[in-house]
Image (tube, rainbow, N blue to C red):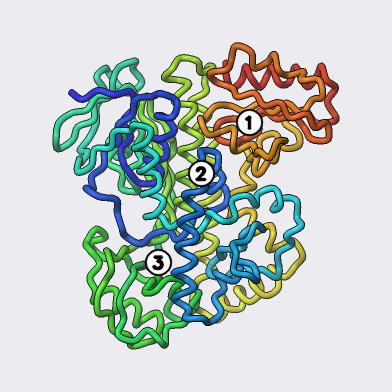
């Protein structure tokens, strides 16, 4: 048998990033993937700010920025010199990429408008460092993360189909290996993480309930060659038969219509099927002459696993939750799962995890997943083609979004930067939130000190009063002295969540006690 510490099933963005997190801290990890090559199918067109910040904390922001530069050039070329909202809102007057908070995205096809955003909002201003690295399509992200895994020595076994799993003991709660059964033989591991998509073989084998709401939409997405696409309107468009968007790169088309689900959801999408859907929804008699890559069929099926853990087997990404792809929330939700789970599983395997640490994965991520499902359901409700829903869209997009601060709130929610966890019994201020863009002395940022996946303790005190806390914990904690009494000292988890801050309302001795509590809670 092939034996390793952790087997990750699935080499999508969630599986690859999780594998890299494990390998970064010395855990032997094997990824099993059914496909022989990274899937070039057109899926999510970008990542959100929270995901870009995760890449930043692992030193991957420069690679993401290079992808964005290339994609913006393609989008600009697609417009042939005409005004393009994506390019305009991500660049300044000189054509340089912006360092403001990126105004990119939509809610139910209602685009976020740059002129309705208050860039001085401190919530947004704390998350601008990654503005040049969010336009990263899913395929590019998989290639980027694949290279990252290769540098870390992750074993990725492609062309391996997982057929089931069993415990080497009585059940998956035993202190025994998990055996993963594949078409090329069995693999043994202490732990298994299923990141094998919405139709997860592992989740089904475990018998974990996948509960939620049935689909109403049938959607398609592809990069296609058209005989004459001139009548297809760029951007999001509603019609009596559904919704569609064309662009921002040549040939990219997404259409969705309220219709019964096909009898065979797994059947490949043919040119004729896609062309019929495009013609019906757009009302334009276009002819599709070919596809670049594979077209995808999707729905607004919204379901979530009741539990993200069954003993030594855990679920992440689409294996744990599925929903419509609007706003690319699924990709980002999966990356968030991976960064939350990775360090906790490392600590458990290496024997320094406090009691119950791994259970906080479900406790923290399941509510976030439930929120995202409702966020996407709300968008589907606004997509209907009837006149009453059209008037509701007018109110939401034309009236509510114009209220001062409303667009800021929607962008912040969509970008993932408002996610919070219950990390302390008496959390105040920033505790429980994402650290974001924290600038330090000597021209560095917090993210620069987080590349190796350790906790980061930023000591802003004038006398370095927290230095002794990190003594003896050097393998787990990076200590950064940054005297600046105007700013709070911070204790930040490997996933970027602030676990402690010495706010000005805390006396020095009380702040120290709270830091000790945080270290005991998260490091044991």
Q: Earlier in the sequence, mark 2 or mark 3?
A: 2
Q: Position of residue 83 (x, y in %)?
A: 56, 79
Is 33 or 383 nearer to us in this picture? 33
Q: Earlier in the sequence, mark 3 or mark 1?
A: 3
Q: Earlier in the sequence, mark 1 or mark 2?
A: 2
Q: Nearer the viewer, mark 1 or mark 2?
A: 2
- Asked which secondary structure carries label 3, the reply is strand
Q: Position of residue 353 (x, y in %)?
A: 51, 18
Is 274 or 43 nearer to us in this picture? 43
- Up/down of 247 relative to 264, above or below: below
291 lies left or right of 90: left
For label 2, the crowd category at 10 Å Cα-Cα, with few meaning under 14, some 14 to 19 and many 20 or more, is many
Q: Nearer the viewer, mark 2 or mark 3?
A: 2
Q: Which label belongs to residue 492? A: 1
* Residue lying furthest left: 184
Q: Position of residue 372 (x, y in %)?
A: 53, 51
Q: CA distance from mark 2 to mark 3?
A: 33 Å
Q: CA distance from mark 1 to mark 2?
A: 16 Å
Please state, as top left, top right, bottom left or bottom right, where the N terminus lies in the image: top left
Where residue 154 sits, quadrant-wise, is top left
- Up/down of 26 relative to 31, above or below: above
Where residue 523 sits, quadrant-wise, is top right
For label 3, the crowd category at 10 Å Cα-Cα, with few meaning under 14, some 14 to 19 and many 20 or more, is many
The residue indicated by pointer 2 is 55
The residue indicated by pointer 3 is 217
Can residue 257 be seen here?
no
Q: CA distance from mark 3 to mark 1?
A: 41 Å
Q: Which label belongs to residue 191? A: none
- Up/down of 513 relative to 135, above or below: above
Q: Residue at x 51, y 38 (%)?
A: 58
């Amino acid at each position: 048998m092939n034996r390793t510490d952790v087997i990750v099933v699935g080499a999508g963005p969630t599986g690859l990033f999780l594998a890299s997190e494990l390998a970064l801290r010395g855990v032997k990890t094997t990824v099993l993937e059914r496909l022989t090559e990274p899937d070039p199918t057109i899926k999510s067109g970008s990542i959100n700010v929270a995901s870009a910040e995760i890449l930043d904390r692992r030193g991957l922001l420069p690679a993401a920025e290079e992808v964005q530069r290339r994609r913006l050039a393609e989008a600009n070329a697609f417009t042939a010199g005409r005004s393009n909202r994506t390019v305009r809102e991500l660049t300044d007057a000189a054509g340089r990429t912006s360092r403001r908070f990126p105004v990119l995205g939509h809610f139910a096809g209602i685009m976020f408008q740059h002129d309705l955003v208050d860039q001085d909002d401190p919530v947004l201003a704390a998350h601008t460092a990654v503005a040049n690295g969010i336009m990263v399509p899913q395929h590019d992200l998989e290639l980027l993360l694949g290279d990252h895994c290769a540098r870390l020595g992750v074993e990725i076994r492609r062309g391996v189909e997982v057929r089931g799993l069993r415990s080497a003991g009585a059940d998956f709660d035993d202190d025994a290996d998990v055996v993963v059964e594949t078409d090329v033989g069995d693999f043994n591991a202490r732990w298994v993480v299923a990141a094998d998509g919405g139709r997860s073989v592992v989740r089904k084998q475990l018998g974990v309930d996948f509960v939620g709401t049935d689909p109403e939409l049938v959607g398609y997405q592809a990069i296609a060659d058209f005989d004459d696409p001139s009548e297809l309107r760029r951007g999001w468009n509603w019609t009596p038969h559904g919704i569609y968007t064309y662009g921002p790169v040549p040939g990219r088309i997404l259409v969705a219509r309220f219709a019964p689900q096909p009898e065979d959801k797994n059947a490949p999408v043919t040119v004729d099927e896609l062309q019929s859907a495009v013609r019906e929804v757009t009302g334009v008699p276009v002819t599709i002459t070919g596809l670049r890559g594979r077209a995808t069929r999707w729905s607004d099926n919204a379901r979530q696993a009741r539990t993200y853990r069954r003993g030594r087997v855990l679920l992440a990404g689409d294996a744990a939750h599925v929903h419509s792809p609007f706003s690319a929330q699924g990709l980002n939700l999966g990356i968030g799962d991976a960064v939350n789970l990775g360090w906790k599983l490392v600590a458990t395997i290496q024997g320094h995890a406090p009691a119950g640490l791994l259970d906080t994965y479900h406790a923290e991520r399941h509510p976030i997943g439930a929120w995202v499902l409702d966020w996407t359901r709300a968008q589907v409700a606004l997509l209907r083609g009837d006149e009453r829903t059209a008037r509701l869209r007018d109110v939401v997009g034309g009236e509510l979004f114009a209220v001062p601060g409303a667009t800021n709130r929607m962008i912040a929610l969509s970008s993932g930067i408002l996610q919070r966890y219950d990390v302390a019994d008496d959390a105040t201020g920033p505790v429980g939130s994402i650290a974001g863009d924290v600038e330090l002395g000597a021209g560095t940022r917090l993210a620069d000190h987080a590349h190796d996946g350790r906790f980061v303790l930023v000591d802003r005190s004038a006398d370095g009063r927290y230095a002794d806390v990190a003594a003896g914990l050097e393998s787990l904690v990076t200590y950064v002295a940054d005297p600046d009494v105007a700013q709070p000292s911070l204790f930040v988890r490997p996933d970027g969540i602030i676990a402690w801050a010495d706010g000005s309302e805390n006396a020095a001795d009380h702040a120290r006690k709270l830091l000790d509590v945080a270290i005991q809670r998260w490091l044991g």
